[in-house]
Each structure stands twice: as C-alpha cells, then as structure tokens.
Amino acid sequence: MNGKELRSAFHSGKYVYGTMLVSRSPKYPETIAGLGLDFVFIDTEHNAIDRTTMSWMCRAYAALNIAPLVRIPTHDKYDASMALDAGAAGVIVPYTENIETVRELVGAVKYKPLKGARLSRFLHGEEALEPELESYLDKANAGHSLIINIESVPAMEQLDELLAVPGLDAVLIGPHDLSCSLGIPEQYKNPVYDSAVREILTKARKAGLGSGIHVHYGDSLEQEIGWCRETGANFVVHHSDILSFALAMKRDLGELKSGIEGAAADKAGMTINI
C-alpha cells in the first residue's frame, strides 16, 4: 500500500495493518515483505534512529509498497518536513494536546514546501492560495498523512476540536502514556482505560478519520479485535518487532525448559535393570 492509498483508507474506514519497527537490519525489509502488512511504524521518538538510517528504512519499505510512517520526536514542523524528505508516507506527532500545533503540522505535511508567513496566513483563513499553487501543493502532498498521538486526559478534553482541524488524517492512541495520564499506569484491562480508549476511537471514526491504538502488550488480541469491531477503529498497529520477539522467545523458552528439564528429572528418577 502506498501513501496515497493509506491516506484514502484512513478516511474511508478500510482496515489497515502494521507494526512498529525497532530493528534497522537490512535483512528486515525482505522478511517483512511477506507478512501482509500495509504500513510500518518507524519510531524516532523513543528509539535511536538517525536521519540517514530513517531514510534508508523509508525508501526500502516504500519500494516494497509498504507505507512507512515516521513518529517524529517533537512537535516541530521542521522535523515533520525532514521525515517527509526522508521518504515517509506519513508523520505521527507524539503527545498532541494543542490545536495550533495540529494546524502547524497540517501546514508542514499537506502544504510542503510552502512555509513562513504565507502559509500561516493561509492556515488561519486570512489569505487564499492561487489556484495553480493550490493544485500543485495538492498533487505534491497527495500521499502524505498526518497522524496525531492522543495520549492524555487534556487531549481527550478537547478531542472534538483537535479532530476538527482540516487536514488531519488519523488518530493513534499511545496506551502507556494514556494509562498514566488517567492515573492507572499500565492497567490496560481497567474499565476506566477501556472506556477512554473506546471514546477516542469512536469519536475519531465519526469524524471520518483513521482511528487506532498501538497495542504493545501481551495477551491483547481479543481486546484489540473487540475495539476494532465495536468502535470502527481501522488503524491497526499491532505490537513491535522487539515485543513479538520477546513474547515468542519467552513462550518457547518456557516450553523448552519444562520439556527438557522435566524429561531430565523423570529420567533421573528411573530405575534401569541390566
């Protein structure tokens, strides 16, 4: 799925599936190409990925028709522009609570390369763009998506206003930070948390935006499926490469230790007649 198709899917309600990537191994794109993912989530907020590496990752996955989404580490419009220059199909903005922040990021993602006073006046409805320029910018940015992380109670309190900013494409819940802001850290089965998640997902879809949550903890499939089916959430960000590895390794090691050491204990207790 390319960036233009992903952006269309967000708004139409079509389900799209992806995961977060931590590994920068050149072997990864070949492996991931066969998984059936629509996008990959490249996180530069919490992971040490430099600009060159980010660009190689974006270009590699885009060439495989897997849309690369980059979470930038700040609210800076120039960081957003840098991610797009690197080849990102979309920008994820962390811990978003401010309407003006969203408006500025819309400018960076949807009206690139226009900047400065002209862009600011246009975004605030003070000045129109020439038809030729507007057509050019629409075509140049048709494959770019703007996604905001909703991760706090203050963001929820003004969610309707945030969702109404023209040019926003999707909302992604940050589960850990949201649980902390709710005062119930990491209590992902808590009814208060579940209610907050459902409220955000439902409102985003009703606004015609992509709606999702980054589920990054174990034993979550049933909950994840329920949220999507019951709220219409269509932006499915499941686990990460490092978490999937950890969960699978923990499970396999448990079975190995039980099988091997259990067998050894049984053998040690056996009587062998010669």
Image (spheres, helix red, strand yellow):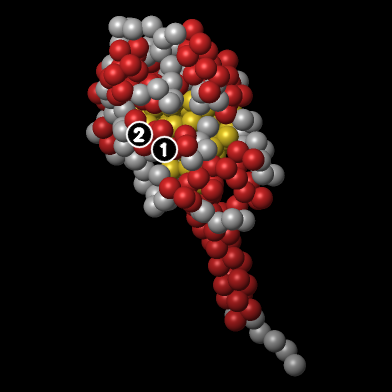
Quarter of the rendering occupied by the N terminus: top right
Counting other residues with Cα less than 10 Å from the Cα at mark 1, is it few (<14), some (14-19), or many (20 or more)? some
The answer to whether 27 is drawn above or below residue 37 in the figure is below
Looking at the picture, how far across and down is residue 12, in whole percent? 57, 15
Q: Is residue 138 left or right of residue 82?
A: right
**From this viewpoint, which residue is outermost toward the bottom?**
274
Q: Identify the amino acid type marked 2.
A: Tyr
Residue 82: mark: 1
Front-most of residues 231 and 210: 210
The answer to whether 98 is drawn above or below residue 21 in the figure is above
Looking at the picture, how far across and down is residue 156, in whole percent? 30, 21
Q: Quadrant of residue 128?
A: top left
Counting other residues with Cα less than 10 Å from the Cα at mark 2, is it few (<14), some (14-19), or many (20 or more)? some
Looking at the picture, how far across and down is residue 20, in whole percent? 50, 42
Proximity of marks 2 and 1: CB atoms separated by less than 8 Å: yes
Quarter of the rendering occupied by the C terminus: bottom right
Can residue 115 be seen in this snapshot? yes
Residue appearing at x 44%, y 8% in the figure: 130
Q: Is residue 158 left or right of residue 257?
A: left
Say which residue label 2 marks. 78
Looking at the picture, how far across and down is residue 220, in whole percent? 50, 38
SS type, badge 2: helix
Q: Is residue 42 left or right of residue 67?
A: left
Q: Identify the amino acid type marked 1.
A: Met
The answer to whether 57 is drawn above or below residue 113 in the figure is below
